[in-house]
Amino acid sequence: MAAVRAVESGERSAAEFFAEPKPASRPRRAAPAARPGVPGGPQAAPGGGPVTVPEGVTALLAEGGAPAALGTAVVETFGEGAEEVLRADPWELLAVPGVAPEQADGFARALLGPRGGPGDERRCRALAVWLLERAALSGHTVLGARTLAEGLARYGVPEPEAAVGEAVDAGAVLAFEDAGEEGAAAGEADAGSAGADGDEEEGGRPVRLLVGLERHALAEESLAEGLARLSSTFIPPGEEEAARWEEAAGRAPGPSAAELVRAAARHGLVAHTGGEAARAEPAALVAVARALGLRAYAAAHSEDGRRRLAALLDTEGGGGSGRDGDPGDGQGGDGPDGSMGPAAVTVDGLLAGREGPGRDEEGAYALDLLAVLDAPQLDAERAAMLVEAVPDGARLVLSGDPHLLGSAGAGQVPADLLAARVCPQVVSRTPDPGPVGELVSGIGIGELNQVEAPGREVVIVPVRDAGEAVHRTVQLVADSVPRALGVPAGLTQVITPGHGGAAGTRVLNAALKERLNPGPGRFGGFDPGDRVAHSPAPGHTVLGTVVSGDEEGLRLDCCGRAVTVPRERVARTVRHGWAITAHQAVGTRWPAAVVVLPGDAVPALDRAWVYTAFGRGERHLSVVHGVDQALPRAVERIPAPERTTRLRTLLRAQAAQAAQAAPPPEAVD
């Protein structure tokens, strides 16, 4: 256990512990390329081998007072030219994950001496980019110019407003004018800065000056153009085909499913919202489309979501899974006999080409309809990659639960699409069943209700402090839930607000490992059978189980896919996974969930967090409750923080352009 605690606390590198030998008519679209560090899918861990750190980089880090251990991350960030980049601009060190401004300042002072002052243009540019990257972690694709200036001022930039302008002039960040909604700031993150980033007026509405990074700007612009393209190139069905769609809608499993089928029949782009039970509606749509002879697929956020979707599609006769539930061989979904492959895929698998229909010669997916479930988990960049590959004339349905925590990356795609009102919107009326469903549905509208739970579906366990919270959590997972409900510990997931603290994931995982899978942690602090959370890129988490470890790295089983995490990446990308955060749990459900709310969790609680965490249990929810009235207050009064984005404005602009280009009614035959 000493090895486990050393790795969990960050005191030792996981690589130190490995010892066992390895076991015996459009422009052509290329497949979207993932950004560096973002994997195409969960089966491939980035970094195929050890990273070689040149001597020059090691010497430079020593000269700047930075630890030699940072060398690997520096080379991964800048490549072979890392030394030249940092020599020319020491503040570029801020681009390396985990480096804070104070550390970059110290590095620059050591290299530049008195020339490395707080007003250095290089420092201002690097800080502006770093602040926007930090904002992206909270979901923002842009910030108000004044908000960014205030952030620069907090780090001692002498003339922050001028520094923003200089960063724009240098091309480090981009500036945009955005006509906000009348009487509101249309998603400005800070209420204090809403309306304060620009005084100009456009049609009676304030015009905000926004700043952002190029990649987020390109993603939102590409996404808006792609969604507009799907709407404009779709040709509604003729009379005979429309009759077949209507007949199919009449056989849909419920009124909301029928409404969705009718909307998708007549439009190329449809938004659909609903809770867990509403997932059956896009599944029914895909089944209907396949029965009508269309190449239809449905994509989920996680492998667990894909499996649940496949079960729904099998129920609806939509060909949800392959033989034994296999999602496919990764070589495209259409068989040699022209038959369609499994309808249920993951978004990552679809983007990487492992799952789904494959692409035509122009790089577009060979499909006629795509329903994307868990759409709120799509950040702007992944959404743009996905939409770009949907062919002209195809149908796209973006479906999801608007009450869940949003995407880990920048953007709020479904929320902006709904706010822009540029396509039909189907709101499901299908309620989530059972006591857990009733509880979660109430949370979604800001009500924390007491529900009847005759089968102990919902249990509240009050605790006085973090130590008791940890003790009761282990007791619930190892004893109480298996004994009372018949749910084994391996099918119960613990969820807590953060990694740190006296009852965060680190402490809980150490306690749960000691009880459920004790061992010396001989593979970098891990043992075979350990549950783990693998995060190959920020915001991208895959859950799995340790199989073994060897010279090549830590071998995991992630939902049936073999993953090898290179030794040098284990400490940074793998944690124990008996306890995870709600953000890591989005898109996955377990038979039982234990949500831990220690006293220090109060600042992290809001309605979306509670809704997401409480909804992860299918049959049972235990709440280890140590926050007193902070829980109902979070549900009733603290909605999820607003994200600052440009997508809704871009979508409205695209719709206005389309309306202007449309021929007048009298000119239409």
Image (cartoon, rainbow, N blue to C red):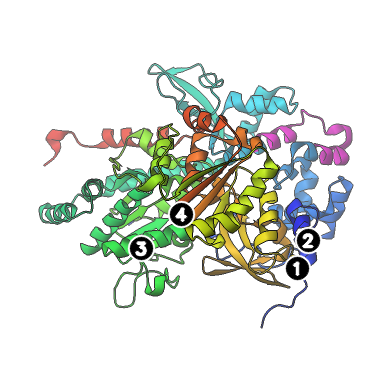
Q: CA distance from mark 1 to mark 3?
A: 38 Å
On screen, residue 347 above or below 612? below
Residue under label 3, please give it. Answer: 311
- Camera-near label (4 vs 1) is 1
Q: Check the picture and name the quadrant holding the N terminus.
A: bottom right
Which residue occupies the foreground of this view, 502 or 465? Answer: 465
Provide the residue span drawn in magenta.
105-129
On screen, residue 328 above or below 63? below
Mark 4, Cα crowd under 10 Å, few <14 / some 14-19 / many 20+, is many
Q: Amino acid at mark 2?
A: Ala
Q: Secondary structure at mark 4?
A: loop
Q: Amino acid at mark 4?
A: His
| Residue occupying image coordinates x 61% and y 50% | 473
| Residue occupying image coordinates x 61% and y 61% | 531
Task: Residue 80: name its quadrant.
Answer: bottom right
Confirm whether residue 269 shows in the render. yes
Q: Amino acid at mark 1?
A: Arg
Q: Secondary structure at mark 2?
A: helix
Q: Secondary structure at mark 1?
A: loop
Residue under label 1, please give it. Answer: 522
